[in-house]
Every structure is written in structure tokens, then in C-alpha cells.
Amino acid sequence: MIRVEHVSKSFNNEQVLHDISVSFDEGKTNLIIGQSGSGKTVLVKCIIGLHEVDEGSIYFHNRNLVTMTVKERQLLRREMGKLFQGGALFDSLTVEDNIKFPLDMFSTLTTGEKKNRVDFCLDRVHLPKAHKLFPAELSGGMQKRAAIARAIVQNPKYLLCDEPNSGLDPITAIVIDNLISDITHEFNMTTIINTHDMNSVMEIGEKVMFIYEGLKDWEGTKDDILDSTDKNLNEFVFASNLAKKIKEKM
Amino acid sequence: MGRVISRPEKNKIYYKQVINEIETLGINSIGIVIIISIFMGAVITLQTRYNLENPLIPLYLIGLTARDTMLLEFSSTIVGLILAGKVGSNIASEIGHMRITEQIDALEIMGVNSASYLVLPKVIAAVIFNPILTLISMFVGVFGGWLASVATGALSSMDYIYGIQYWFVPFYITYSLVKTVVFAIIITTVPAYFGYYVKGGALEVGRASTKGVVTSSILILLFNVILTQLLLA
């Protein structure tokens, strides 16, 4: 479980996050939604510790990230997997070496054990024959799947995904969503997904937090969204003509 | 800088990285160092010969001039400046690209000290291999001078060989290698700094690369003066 308490963050006197408090449950896909520029990515970067918070605390199973030393943070981060928007695979390494990298760096596994683990992760993301390919040789969806494999290779307790569907077609996006959701349940991870894709929300949003202009505006499940009377949330969810027509017919 | 020189997470991985960087930054630079040094050695020899009109000055001094120019200045400073352009832009753009595509963030999230992992192997590789490049440049440059002398008939092979052996000061090689080590640190760390802290997109990576090369070149010239004063005065 990850607990965010009264977190505020500003850049150059511009307040980006205002007193955010929320908890992200273990074994669930927790979604942070909101418009572009609402503060979603900043919140995720604060949770990881890539941005320092101005005020507040962030607990990973009662361990406060904010008060940790650099070394303690490095150790905590080994319990995290992160899926970046663009995949962030290392260009100079093959898919196999990308996935093996955290194991080479931190594990004491033998070469054979590492290979088995890489094979397992690649099979799990349905990329069984991509070992020797370089990231530039993969499609967008394949890059995301390879990045997911790298994120889960160390059996993380926490999985953080930054707009995992950006740049993907709707069918591939759903494949990625379901993959993240399945992995979350299978390994009982605390997964946080930062997105503005409503298809993702309706597909896998077990717990959803809506941020509006840096404030937590709404919290609930994907089923609660359709019944919500929150004005800002409704404007966001039913922004497209298609969504408006669907709502009218409901 | 403190993060760069901190203890590696896994020595084996860093060792592999150092070997890779020796190939990328060092071995791949041998060609350009040889080409430039051979031509510069030739030109120094020919220019000295054609400007030396006083019949009282013995011709073997042309060999001495070519040797000392290569040893004292060209093989360390000018090769340093050339490497600042070739290697420096490579380092700044590589690390800058990794920054804007979030690869550095990915390293940090994995718990890797990204500054150390990306920069330290380059510094070690350059400190180990650049002195070798300097020595290659010295030999090739002096050889280039001999080749030009013989090919053009500007002076005899015997005069040139006598000149390069005449009044040889071994400390000049030490002085040149000390400068090379300092320049190697500048060539790797300064562009790495500009690449590591780049913000924005491809345009900013290009700017960081240019800033890295210009700043490291200026620092090389500045440290050249300081080290000359400290070591030769």
C-alpha cells in the first residue's frame, strides 16, 4: 500500500499540487486521472522521489519516502517497477539485456537463473521471441510490453505506470491495460497508473482518483464515475461527442 | 561530482562499461589521432625548414623543433582539443538523449546511481586510454616529420634523425602525459554535465553538446597555461 498525506508541490512559485491525500491499495490497479497539466505526472514523480515534495508525507507500507536518506531511497526503489510513457528502454541494449539489467545490477542469481527469469517475463508480456531485438526494432506496443517485462523482472511490490497507452491504437491499448491489471493481481502489487485515457479507466479502474488543477477533486471506482455529479469530473469524462451521446442514451 | 565518484553498485558491470568506453572513446579515436598527427608532424617540419634561412643554424634543429612541438604541445593540447570535439559531443548527446527519453530516470528508479554509472566509466576509460593516444600521436607526428623531410628533400634523413635525438628531455613526455590526464577528466566530465542536466528536446540536446565542447575546449586551454606554469616554470 502507498499512502500520500497532505502533499503539496510548487515550481517557481507556481503551485502544482495542493494538499493531496490519497491511499493506493495493494493488489489493485489505482488510476490517477485528470487533464493534461493537472499535476498527475508531478504527483507520480513525487511518489517515486524524482521530485521533492514541499510539504507532506509519502508512505510505502509505513516507510516515509520524504524522510529517507539517498541510500534508503535507492533500496526502496529496488522494490518499485516503473513503466515510462515512452518505455525508456536503453537504446544500446537488446530487449533481453534491458530486462536482465536490474538482475545484473542487484541480484545474485546465476546466469541460467537470470535467463529463466527473463524468459518468464518475456513470455508473460507475450514477447517470447524478442530477446535479440533492439528497442528501435520494436513497435510502440512491443516497446511498452518489453518495458513492462523490465519493470516486473525483480518482482516489485509497487508498479508505477505513466500514461502506458499514449501513442497506442485502442486495441493495443486495451491489451496493455489488461496486461498491467493481470500482473497486478497475479503478483499482488500496488499499481498506480497515471492516465487521461477513459477507455483505460473503464477497463481496469478499480480505484480512481481525479485531479483537477492540482487538487484531488474526486475518488471512487470505475462504476461510480458514471453516477458522479462532480461537475469537473463529468466535463472530463464526457468531453467527447461519443461519450456525451452514450450518456444521453443511458 | 560526489555522486559520480561514489562506490559502484556492482564492480563487474562497471568494469564491462569501462571496456566498452575504452573502445568507444579511445580505440575509435586512434584513426583520427594518427591522421592529424602525421600531417601536423609533416607540416611543422616543412614550415620550420622553409622559414629557416640562416645558414648558421644547423638543419638537424628542424628535427628537434618537430619533436619538441609534438611532445610539448601538439600531442597533448591539440589532440586534447580534437578529442573534446569528437568525444565531448558524443558524450553530451548520448547522455542528453538518455535524459530526454527518461532512460536516466529509469536508472534512478531501478536504484542505480545514474551519474556514477554513466560518467565514471567514461572518465576512467579516458584517463587510461588518452595517454596512449598521446604517445601514439608523438610517435606518428615525429614519423610524419621524417616522411615529409625525405619525400620533399627538405632535409636529409640523417639530419632529421640526429635532430630528434639531440638534447632530448624525458621530462617533456611526463609533462605531456600529466596534461593529457587532466584534459581527459575535462573532456569527459564537462560534456557529461551538460548532457546530464539537459531539459527539453532534441534542440536542447544539440545546444548542450555545443556548450559541452566549447566549455571543455576553453578549460583545456586554461589548464594548459596553469599546468605549464606549474610543471615547467
Image (spheres, grey):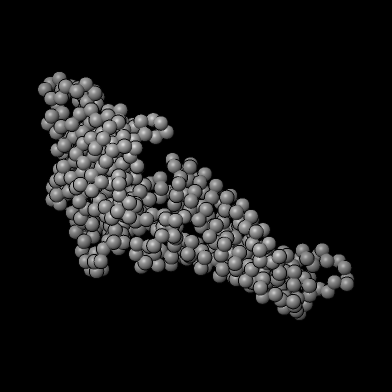
x, y percentage for residue A21?
23, 35
Using the rendered image of the protein, determine whether residue A170 is visible from the camera's viewpoint: no
Is A139 drawn above or below residue B140 in the view shown? above
Count of labels in the image: 0
State the residue at coordinates (60%, 54%). B219
* Above or below: residue A221 compared with residue B73: above
- Residue A250 position, x and y percent, is 11, 22
The picture quadrant where one finds residue A41 is top left
Query: What residue is drawn where x is 33% and y is 51%?
Result: A69
Is A178 left, or right, of B2 in this rendering?
left
Farthest residue to the top: give it.
Answer: A248
Q: Quadrant of residue A44?
A: top left
Residue B104 location, x and y as percent? 38, 50
Q: Residue at x 39, y 62 (%)?
A: B7
Q: Is residue B116 left or right of residue A150?
A: right
Residue at (48, 41) in percent of width and height? B203
The answer, for residue B174, to whether it is visible in the render is yes
Q: Is residue B85 above or below residue A235?
A: below
Closest to the observer: B72 or A11? A11
Left or right? Give the position of A73 relative to B175: left
- Residue B31, image x, y percentages: 56, 65
Find the residue positioned furthest to the right: B55
> Split into 4 quadrants, where in the image is the N terminus of chain A?
top left
Name which quarter of the figure residue A57 lies in.
top left
